[in-house]
Image: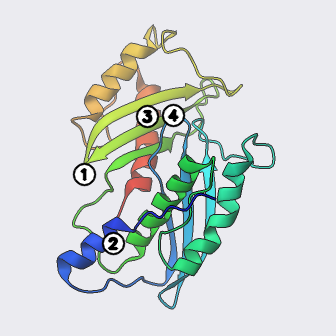
């Protein structure tokens, strides 16, 4: 394994800025890494007596499906998910060695644990959401059996970018040039994006002719915001 450490930067900034040592509150906390086209990493961190006692790691694909490492043809990614939890416990921090050939997964797990520990801290930033890009998923449509996956980018508690794809029942991605609701899907998506950037996140008013798209998109955005939430 390649030796490399990523520090728990956000917690350190908090400690330096307020001059006291932050403590972790007992409980179970979830954290999500920034998401890209290929998905994201997830961590569940258990805190007992103010210490990290266990960590569970998972990884999602860009279709919002959990990776099955027994069938995944990149064994190093599975190795990262299996070996990093013990390091987080031993280090009592969001610090671990980067697994060679699984740099993206390793860094994603570290970031996910870092964010979980911020949620566990008794001292939190004065903001609602982490900055970054977060993935979300809608419910399955009764109309066509598809669901939406969205990527919501946040900066200073505001949505600054939005991307979406529709996953069909056969797990393929629908071509956005296909017309639904009697108008191009791509146009409907752009209309939603424009509204999402100026509306309360996840509560865009129904777009005429695209009721189902608006409702599903709102639900998927709210799911992404739950992953980004600090407080």
Residue 231 circle label: none
For the N terminus, the quadrant is bottom right
Mark 3 Cα within 10 Å, few/some/many (few <14, many 20+)? many
Q: Return the residue found at the far front.
A: 2
Secondary structure under tag 3 reads helix
Which label lies toward us, 2 or 1? 2
Q: Earlier in the sequence, mark 4 or mark 1?
A: 4
Q: Which residue is mark 1?
A: 157
In 3D space, how far apart are the residues under numbered discs 3 and 1 (Cα atoms)?
19 Å
Mark 2 Cα within 10 Å, few/some/many (few <14, many 20+)? many
**Is residue 96 depicted above or below 73 in this figure?**
below
Q: Which residue is mark 2?
A: 11
Q: Earlier in the sequence, mark 3 or mark 1?
A: 1
Q: Residue at x 44, y 65 (%)?
A: 114
Q: Return the residue found at the far bottom.
A: 49
In 3D space, how far apart are the residues under numbered discs 2 and 3 (Cα atoms)?
33 Å
**Is residue 129 depicted above or below 221 in this figure?**
below
Which label lies toward us, 2 or 3? 2
Is residue 202 visible in this depiction of the protein? no
In 3D space, how far apart are the residues under numbered discs 2 and 1 (Cα atoms)?
19 Å
Q: Which residue is mark 4?
A: 37
Residue 2 image offset from top left, x and y in percent: 58, 57
Mark 4 Cα within 10 Å, few/some/many (few <14, many 20+)? few
Q: Earlier in the sequence, mark 4 or mark 2?
A: 2
**Is residue 158 depicted above or below 14 in this figure?**
above
Q: Earlier in the sequence, mark 4 or mark 3?
A: 4
Tell me, yes or no, whether the two marked residues, 3 and 1, touch with CB atoms within 8 Å. no
Q: Which residue is mark 3?
A: 217
């Amino acid at each position: 394994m390649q030796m490399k450490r990523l520090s728990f930067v956000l917690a350190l900034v908090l400690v330096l800025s307020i001059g006291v040592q932050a403590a972790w509150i007992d409980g179970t906390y979830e954290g999500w890494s920034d998401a890209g086209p290929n998905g994201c990493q997830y961590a569940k961190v258990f805190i007992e007596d103010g210490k990290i006692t266990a960590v569970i790691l998972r990884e999602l694909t860009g279709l919002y499906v959990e990776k099955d490492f027994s069938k995944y043809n990149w064994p190093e990614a599975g190795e990262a998910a299996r070996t990093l939890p013990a390091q987080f416990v031993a280090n009592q921090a969001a610090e671990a060695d980067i697994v060679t050939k699984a740099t993206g997964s390793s860094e994603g797990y570290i970031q996910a644990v870092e964010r979980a520990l911020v949620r566990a801290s008794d001292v939190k930033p004065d903001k609602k959401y982490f900055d970054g890009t977060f993935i979300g998923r809608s419910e399955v449509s009764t109309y066509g059996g598809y669901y939406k996956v969205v990527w919501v980018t946040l900066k200073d508690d505001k949505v600054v970018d939005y991307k979406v794809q529709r996953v069909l029942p056969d797990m393929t991605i629908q071509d956005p040039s296909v017309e639904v609701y009697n108008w191009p899907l791509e146009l409907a998506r752009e209309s939603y994006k424009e509204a999402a950037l100026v509306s309360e996140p996840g509560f865009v008013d129904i777009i005429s002719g695209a009721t189902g798209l608006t409702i599903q998109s709102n639900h998927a955005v709210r799911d992404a915001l739950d992953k980004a939430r600090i407080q």
